[in-house]
Image: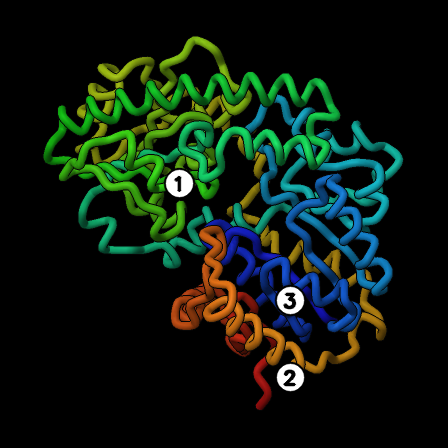
Amino acid sequence: MNIYIKLEIETRELTSRLILGMYAAAKGHQVLIGDDELLKLVQKKKLNPGIILEKSITPTDSRIEQLKDYKDNKSITTSIDEEGGLVRDDIEKFLISRFSEETISLTDRIFCWSKYDYEKLKKLFPKYEKKFVITGNPRVNIWGKKYKNLFTLPDIKNKKYILISSNLGTGVSKQRLSEMYKYFNENNYFDNKQYEEAEVKSLIYNFQLLFKFVSAINYITKRFPDFNFLIRPHPSESVKNWNNFFKKKKNLEISKDFTLSDWIENSEIIIHNGCTAGVEAYARKKKIISFEPLEIKSQFDFSNKFGFTAKNEIELGNLIEKVHDIEKIDKANKEKEYFEQFIYRFNNFENENFSNNINDEWSKFESKELSKKNNLSIIKLINKLRLFKNIFIKPYFNEKFPPLDRRKIINIINKIKETDSSLNNVHFELIGPKLFKLNLTKW
């Protein structure tokens, strides 16, 4: 069959999408992975019908039109929400903003990360209960031991970084606040008053938290001049905006290089507040400090339950001093207490192959209509024209998804094959600046 997988944020999704696509290709499917331009080719019927994996079915006017076009092309639409909301305690409000009766009716399968989002979606949209399936997200699989070799980076590990993972958004976002509000307004997010109130509270909270983080970072970089600190901005945040908050410091870097998983796996300590980095660091058995300087609890409190907690910058400094040189820290009682909740929200990522779960669901739709071969020579020509336009006519750089690096992808693929020899015959071909193909090698 033809499988079309959307990739929105390269550093967040590339590795897991590669793994998912390779398992599909190993079953004999032709897999295309790319940005939104890939799915526009399906909309315009320049690609034959196939199975689509969307990254969300948010009820915006543009997404609804896309979903209708997929149906018109006789494609099967599946989706897994890459924002997830699994670290949120107010997940119902979040799901209402990401799904609607109309978008669900236009989608054939909605893959859930775990029982947590599955049960909430069934409660909110009981009419479409059969469309929700717990598969797990391949992004979570890569937190496990099996894929540890994908994230071994001596350059990071040797410098013994202390990672500060940010998801503050407000104040350091690439977008102005007015632009963010305009986006929410135009895409009907604020039609839901509950969501609007929650979002405004979140903006105020994040502003307060940002200034507490800036003060704490100034304190710990001064207190520990021989330690290396790295701020890893969220994909929606700007490195430049973060830099504006600090004078130049020898022991502080702000970078989006490498993936968040690379930094977590190779850093000495992970500092965060309400960030998915907290749960991933827990899964990777890392040293974690949740910095919680505000009395108000955020809706992302779940990820703060693991590791140590610092209520102010002095406590933060003391904890860094305490845990930095300790080789092994016994799991705190609270970590054992919350382990079942972790599995409830993120599924059993060590013992289950989430890519196979998704592929099993896709196989239920197998048909001749979805298996018609594509003429990729036309697609290659379209992508050459796109590259020419981006370079010479209308220069454009998308920080979330820069042009693909062939050598980088091949390196990741080779490491994936080392973890599972059943994928050895999967062949990779770069078709365009943001589009590649996976299929079985032809002997």
Q: Nearer the viewer, mark 2 or mark 1?
A: 1
Q: Quadrant of the C terminus?
A: bottom right
Residue at coordinates 43% horizontally, 21% vertically from top-left? 207
Q: Which residue is nearer to you in this view: 384 or 273?
A: 384
- In terms of secondary structure, where does tag 2 sit? helix
Which residue is tagged 2? 377
Can see residue 95? no
Can see residue 292? yes
Residue at coordinates 61% horizontally, 76% vertically from top-left? 439
Which residue is tagged 1? 238
Q: CA gap, disc 3 to disc 2?
A: 22 Å
Q: In the image, what residue type sits under mark 2?
A: Ser
Residue 24, label in figure:
3
Q: CA gap, disc 2 to disc 1?
A: 38 Å
| Position in image of residue 407 (x %, y %) | 39, 72
Q: Is residue 352 above or below residue 440?
A: above
Q: How crowded is the residue under tag 1: few (<14 C-alpha within 10 Å), some, or many (20+)?
A: many
- In terms of secondary structure, where does tag 1 sit? loop
- In terms of secondary structure, where does tag 3 sit? helix
Q: Earlier in the sequence, mark 2 or mark 1?
A: 1
Q: Is residue 274 above or below residue 114?
A: above
Q: Which residue is nearer to you in this view: 206 or 322?
A: 206
